[in-house]
């Protein structure tokens, strides 16, 4: 399945947080490395919480594409991400609705959808703090 997006991945190793920003490709722009290829450069990325930021993704983010992404994630992590937090930042109603539909295919993760980056980040931090206190 050919998808037209590129990813910017930031790994905060001290806080075990991945920030993954999706960007739409412009005409003539190369897609760059696959998301899983980028994550494979990080030691045990399944032990990180993740914030997926879709606000700059301007193409239609269909449920089929989201299924494609979650299938790739699940194949890559093979359940090793159990209990980690995943914030999905949409920014518009249609995108947020599609993101909520994708949540059901990852039952071992704590997932929530947010309109702003800061809301998502605060939620991830609260989940991390709760795990550390336990």
Image (cartoon, rainbow, N blue to C red):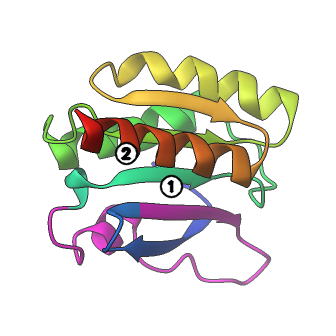
Note whether 131 is above or below 116 in the view shown: above
Residue at left 47%, top 29%? Answer: 111
Residues rendered magenta in the picture: 18-44
Note whether 22 is above or below 120 in the view shown: below
Q: Nearer the viewer, mark 2 or mark 1?
A: 2
Picture disc at residue 55: none
Q: Which residue is mark 2?
A: 128
Q: Residue furthest right?
A: 92
Q: Secondary structure at mark 1?
A: loop
Q: Is residue 114 left or right of residue 67?
A: right
Q: Dot 2, crowdedness within 10 Å: few (<14), some or many (≥20)?
A: some
Q: Is residue 31 left or right of residue 86?
A: right
Image location (x, y in percent) of residue 46? 22, 52
Residue toward you, 63 or 113 = 113
Residue toward you, 12 or 45 = 12
Q: Secondary structure at mark 2?
A: helix
Q: Which residue is mark 1?
A: 2
Q: Are marks 2 and 1 in contact (CB under 8 Å)?
A: no
Residue toward you, 20 or 126 = 126
Image location (x, y in percent) of residue 28? 73, 84
Q: Quadrant of the C terminus?
A: top left
């Amino acid at each position: 399945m050919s998808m037209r997006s590129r990813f910017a991945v930031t790994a905060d190793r001290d806080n075990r947080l991945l920030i993954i920003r999706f960007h739409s490709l412009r005409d003539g722009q190369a897609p760059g490395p696959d998301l899983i290829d980028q994550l494979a450069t990080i030691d045990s990325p399944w032990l990180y919480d993740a914030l997926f930021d879709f606000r700059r993704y301007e193409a239609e983010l269909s449920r089929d594409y989201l299924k494609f992404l979650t299938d790739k994630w699940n194949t890559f992590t093979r359940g090793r991400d159990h209990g980690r937090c995943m914030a999905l930042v949409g920014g518009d109603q249609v995108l947020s609705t599609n993101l909520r539909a994708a949540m059901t295919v990852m039952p071992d993760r704590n997932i929530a959808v947010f309109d702003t980056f800061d809301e998502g980040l605060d939620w991830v931090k609260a989940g991390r703090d709760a795990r550390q206190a336990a």
